[in-house]
């Protein structure tokens, strides 16, 4: 039996990307899954059942995490049937626009989904968490440094980092452990949707931070959850950048960032 065997894991954003890959890996480890996403689950459920060799339970709910009342209702409904042992939150969007191109509505959408969506899920699930339970929230390397074309995304992820540090201090005395997952660029539908100048700039960032395969990123995250680590940053280059951001002067870090962007945008 593995760490996740027979545990009930709530996964938001489970219909695609990192959330779906996490569901695939967990179902093969015998975890019972409660899945949430605004997208339909039809094909996802078929895929998961095909690899469900342990006859684990799989329940799914359609959920828009920006709707606080509905999030509270859906999670309460799920918890009345299967309370969570672990909650994993993956919902997020990038919003790949430069600040000059971005409307207020676009900026607010990124903040609402990434930041307030995270807050809504945590607030909804908190009454059903007890000593020994765990929460994993997805941040990003953009939680530690800004990136070209990602002012709204970086703002949301910086906020999530600060929020989760604070919540960790508050929930630790109750025996609830927090893990923050801060990956470098990963090839997912989220990043594939980036076009034009954002995709160009992303090339440089991927060269700098390294781009991980989604399977490897999820394995690192799950290992971090198993070890109850507060911060999981997968990838050697990403960890080197995190240390650089911590120990080197901001002026030096910004110089590297400017050079990376200039190189990426060259025709």
Image (tube, rainbow, N blue to C red):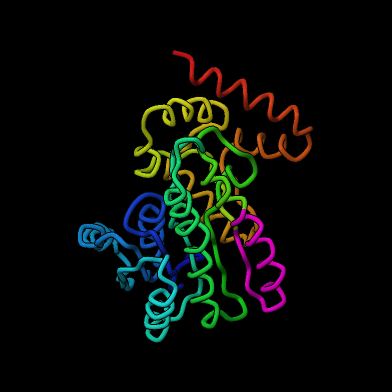
Please name the residue shown 49% across and 35% down the image.
100
> From what the image shows, is residue 198 above or below residue 228?
above
| Left or right placement of residue 35 versus residue 247 in this view | left
Task: Give the number of marks.
Answer: 0
Which residue is nearer to you in this view: 244 or 71?
71
Please name the residue shown 47% across and 30% down the image.
202
Residue 146's spot in the image, x, y percent?
A: 60, 39
Which residue is nearer to you in this view: 187 or 3?
187
Residue 181's spot in the image, x, y percent?
A: 56, 52
Q: Quadrant of the C terminus?
A: top left
| Left or right placement of residue 229 versus residue 18 in this view | right
Residue 54's spot in the image, x, y percent?
A: 33, 68
Residue 114's spot in the image, x, y percent?
A: 49, 56
> From what the image shows, is residue 39 above or below residue 203?
below
Main SS of residues in magenta: helix
Q: Is residue 98 magenta?
A: no
Outermost top residue: 267
| Left or right placement of residue 8 versus residue 137 in this view | left
Please name the residue shown 32% across and 62% down the image.
38
Which residue is nearer to you in this view: 205 or 267?
267
Please name the residue shown 44% across and 78% down the image.
72
Quadrant of res 180: bottom right
Q: Which residues are magenta?
A: 159-179
Q: Is residue 168 magenta?
A: yes
């Amino acid at each position: 039996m593995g760490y996740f065997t027979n545990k009930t894991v709530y996964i938001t954003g489970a219909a695609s990307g990192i959330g779906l890959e996490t569901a695939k890996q967990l179902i093969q480890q015998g975890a019972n899954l409660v899945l949430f996403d605004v997208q339909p689950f039809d094909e996802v459920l078929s895929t998961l059942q095909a690899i469900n060799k342990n006859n684990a339970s799989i329940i799914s709910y359609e959920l828009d995490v920006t709707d606080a009342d509905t999030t509270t209702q859906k999670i309460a409904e799920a918890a009345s049937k299967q309370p969570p042992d672990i909650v994993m939150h993956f919902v997020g969007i990038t919003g790949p626009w430069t600040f000059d191109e971005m409307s207020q509505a676009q900026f607010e959408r990124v903040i609402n989904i990434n930041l307030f969506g995270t807050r809504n899920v945590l607030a909804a699930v908190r009454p059903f968490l007890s000593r020994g339970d765990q929460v994993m929230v997805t941040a990003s390397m953009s939680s530690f440094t800004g990136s070209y074309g990602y002012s709204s995304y970086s703002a949301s992820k910086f906020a999530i980092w600060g929020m989760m540090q604070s919540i960790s201090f508050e929930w630790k005395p109750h025996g609830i452990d927090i893990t923050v997952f801060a990956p470098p660029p990963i090839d997912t539908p989220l990043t594939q949707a980036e076009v034009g100048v954002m995709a160009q700039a992303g090339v440089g960032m991927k060269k700098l931070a390294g781009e991980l395969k989604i399977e490897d990123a999820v394995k690192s995250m799950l290992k971090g959850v198993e070890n109850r680590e507060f911060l999981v940053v997968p990838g050697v280059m990403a960890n080197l950048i995190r240390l650089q951001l911590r120990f080197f002067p901001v002026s030096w870090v910004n110089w590297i960032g400017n050079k990376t962007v200039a190189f990426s945008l060259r025709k």
